[in-house]
Image (spheres, grey):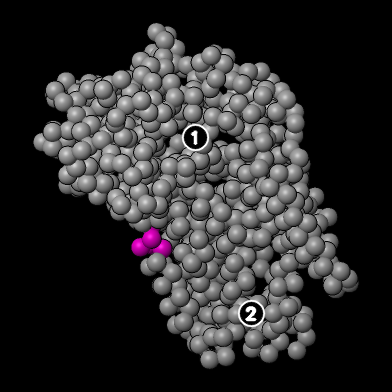
């Protein structure tokens, strides 16, 4: 049987579906809020890949012409060349636009993208101090890594199943179910794993694979009479997550998108949906360049975000779309097509594709480990000042301390004087953690011993079951009650300092200019739905009551003001930046802080006034003047990002807080 006969018949409607997927992603990234469920475009791509790859493998297995080498070399020629071009361009642009720490981080992401484990890199990076998504030019390549991992493993699995006559709908259904159940279970424990890791995405590929056997098996004849309905139902279902994603649960949006894409692929290629809408010339054209569109759009958007330091103006984002289309056409026409088309020089093209990716990987490794960076970024502003005031969250992980308090590997646990019994406990989320360094230094001439306990994103309160971002259980904080009970039972611990990013838990969002505006929801143990302020005050009250019964002195820290800008803008100017000047004034209006946090300040004031054992310590009083809350003091930054204190800020606050412990 000829190779031509084995080739899949071209379906323009699948290119059209690719166009829907890529534009959904682009719009959701560049125009937040315009297409609330646009992120499901990635899930559509996974379904399409599952369908096409399984079709290719199945056809060749049936005639004993499947070759691993041929399969992988085809994938290399399809994926590697244009990806290498985009990564190399990103390397050059990053050299011009990024600060040294950002460029080193880019090197890590270039390396992991070139070796297709970017999804694992991002999963490990997820944390409270993870840089904003918009400042990671290669963030979107997690999905390409997931696809490559599928391409790597699925042929071997399919061949094994075929040898045992198990490559059928039942087996695919079992893999589908196992992956889907695993994804549902891990969502409440580690939602970032559910999002980034291939095992929890396998069911989406299997949905596409199942279409191959549904439409080419014993039931195909009965199903074909429903193909028109499949198209229309699939199209209608697809509109739900795309248009109403903000009103539906994240997992439901993904399921709807996967089902919709599967139905459309199984639908009638001549129906109005498949044959007219999806097969129209514009849709097919965008579908053909969809891979390049996906690669280019986020790189350009992210670097523009970095240049402007905020979401770029709408006109700039429209310009990014136009440039993306132009670059995508050029890379499709002169890179993708050149490496994929024709039978001439295939071995040369394959070798060149693999060689290009190897060079990119080496480049990424070099940047990660210290290749020369843009000295302009350093020379313009004395970048080293910023580098010296930051620290890694992992600096506060002590394995022995974690084991002693039965804490998890990502929980803060550190004792100022190891081997001695703690007498003062600093508990909370990362806003408690930020105080430890300065406070422990300020307490060196006392007899007190400080311990830092807590988890990023976890309120140290009783009465809460979980913190949620939108509808995802982001943090269930399972270890919170364990360490709190231990502190209550310890007579040596006389004082408990409670600190948290309270305004965030109450309001549920950041400043929109500096974040991805994630919506956080507090969930109470009793299941009653309350506002963020009500849940916060109720759980705080319960916690303070428990501390009072245990005869603990409590210092309740009023959280510092959040900034609506990146603090290093006060001391750094990028080599190429839209504004090209230092941020002045380097602070936020105190009136703005107080207006934004009115509920929070009132809650802390009420709760402290009701209890003689509770004393307030106000970070705004320490860091703010009458009119401004400053991010810089004596030419040193007090903040390391828009809401966490720097080493300098922590040290300064520590000198003011330590006297309250005597």
Image quadrant for the N terminus?
bottom right
In which quadrant of the rendered view does residue 551 lie?
Answer: top left
Would you name the residue on which mark 1 appears? Answer: 515
Instruction: Provide residue 135's location: percent of width, then percent of height.
Output: 59, 38
Q: Is residue 262 magenta?
A: no
Instruction: Provide residue 515's location: percent of width, then percent of height.
Output: 49, 35
* Magenta-drawn stretch, dominant element (helix, strand or loop): helix
Marks 1/2 in contact by CB < 8 Å: the verdict is no
Q: Which mark is residue 176?
A: none
Image quadrant for the C terminus?
top left
In which quadrant of the rendered view does residue 428 lie?
Answer: top left
Instruction: Provide residue 629's location: percent of width, then percent of height.
Output: 44, 16
Magenta extent: 183-187
Would you name the residue on which mark 2 appears? Answer: 57
In which quadrant of the rendered view does residue 144 lie?
Answer: bottom right
The residue positioned 54% from the left and 65% from the top of the image is 47
The residue positioned 65% from the left and 77% from the top of the image is 56
The residue positioned 65% from the left and 83% from the top of the image is 59
The residue positioned 73% from the left and 67% from the top of the image is 76
């Amino acid at each position: 049987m000829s190779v031509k006969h084995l080739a899949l018949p071209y379906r323009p409607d699948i290119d059209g579906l690719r166009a829907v997927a890529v534009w959904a992603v682009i719009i959701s990234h560049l125009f937040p809020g315009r297409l609330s469920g646009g992120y499901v475009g990635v899930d559509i791509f996974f379904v399409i890949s599952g369908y096409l790859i399984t079709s290719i493998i199945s056809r060749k297995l049936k005639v004993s012409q499947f070759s691993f080498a041929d399969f992988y070399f085809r994938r290399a020629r399809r994926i590697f060349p244009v990806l290498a071009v985009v990564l190399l361009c990103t390397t050059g642009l990053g050299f011009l636009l990024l600060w040294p720490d950002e460029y080193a981080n880019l090197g890590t992401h270039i390396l992991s993208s070139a070796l297709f484990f970017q999804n694992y890199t991002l999963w490990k990076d997820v944390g409270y101090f993870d840089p904003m998504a918009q400042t990671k030019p290669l963030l979107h390549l997690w999905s390409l890594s997931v696809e490559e991992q599928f391409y790597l493993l699925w042929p071997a699995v399919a061949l094994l199943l075929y040898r045992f006559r198990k490559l059928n709908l039942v087996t695919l259904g079992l893999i589908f179910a196992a992956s889907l159940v695993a994804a549902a279970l891990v969502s409440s424990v580690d939602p970032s794993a559910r999002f980034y890791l291939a095992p929890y995405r396998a069911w989406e590929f299997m949905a596409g694979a199942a279409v191959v056997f549904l439409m080419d098996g014993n039931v195909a004849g009965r199903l074909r009479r429903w193909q028109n309905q499949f198209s229309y139902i699939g199209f209608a279902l697809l509109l739900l997550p795309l248009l109403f994603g903000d009103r539906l649960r994240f997992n439901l949006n993904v399921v709807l998108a996967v089902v919709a894409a599967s139905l459309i692929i199984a639908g009638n290629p001549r129906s109005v949906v498949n044959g007219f809408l999806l097969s129209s010339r514009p849709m097919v054209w965008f579908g053909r360049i969809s891979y390049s569109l996906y690669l280019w759009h986020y790189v350009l958007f992210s670097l523009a975000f970095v240049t402007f330091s905020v979401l770029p103006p709408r006109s700039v984002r429209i310009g990014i779309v136009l440039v993306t289309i132009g670059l995508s056409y050029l890379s499709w026409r002169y890179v993708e097509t050149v490496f994929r088309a024709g039978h001439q020089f295939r071995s040369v093209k394959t070798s060149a594709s693999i060689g290009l990716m190897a060079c990119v990987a080496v480049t990424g490794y070099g940047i990660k480990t210290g290749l020369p960076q843009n000295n302009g970024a350093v020379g313009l502003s004395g970048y080293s000042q910023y580098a010296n005031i930051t620290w890694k969250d992992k600096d506060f992980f002590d394995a022995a301390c974690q084991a002693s308090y039965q804490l998890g590997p990502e929980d803060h646990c550190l004792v100022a004087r190891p081997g001695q019994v703690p007498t003062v406990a600093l508990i909370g989320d990362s806003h408690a953690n930020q105080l430890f360094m300065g406070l422990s230094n300020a307490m060196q001439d006392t007899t007190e011993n400080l311990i830092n306990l807590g988890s990023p994103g976890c309120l140290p309160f009783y009465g809460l079951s979980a913190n949620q971002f939108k509808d995802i259980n982001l943090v269930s904080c399972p270890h919170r009650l364990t360490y709190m009970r231990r502190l209550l039972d310890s007579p040596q611990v006389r004082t408990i300092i409670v600190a948290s990013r309270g305004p965030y838990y109450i309001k549920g969002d950041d400043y929109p200019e500096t974040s991805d505006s994630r919506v956080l929801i507090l969930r109470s143990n009793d299941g009653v739905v309350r506002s963020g302020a009500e849940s916060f005050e109720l759980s705080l009250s319960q916690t303070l009551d428990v501390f009072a019964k245990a005869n603990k002195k409590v210092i309740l820290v009023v959280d510092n003001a959040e900034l609506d800008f990146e603090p290093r803008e006060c001391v750094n100017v990028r080599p190429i930046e839209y504004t090209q000047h230092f941020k002045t004034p380097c602070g936020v209006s105190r009136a703005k802080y107080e207006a934004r946090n009115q509920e929070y300040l009132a809650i802390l004031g009420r709760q402290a006034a009701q209890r003689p054992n509770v004393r307030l310590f106000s970070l705004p009083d320490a860091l703010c003047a009458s009119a401004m809350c400053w991010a810089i003091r004596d030419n040193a930054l007090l903040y390391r990002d828009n809401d966490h204190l720097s080493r300098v800020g922590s040290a300064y606050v520590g000198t003011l807080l330590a006297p309250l412990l005597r």
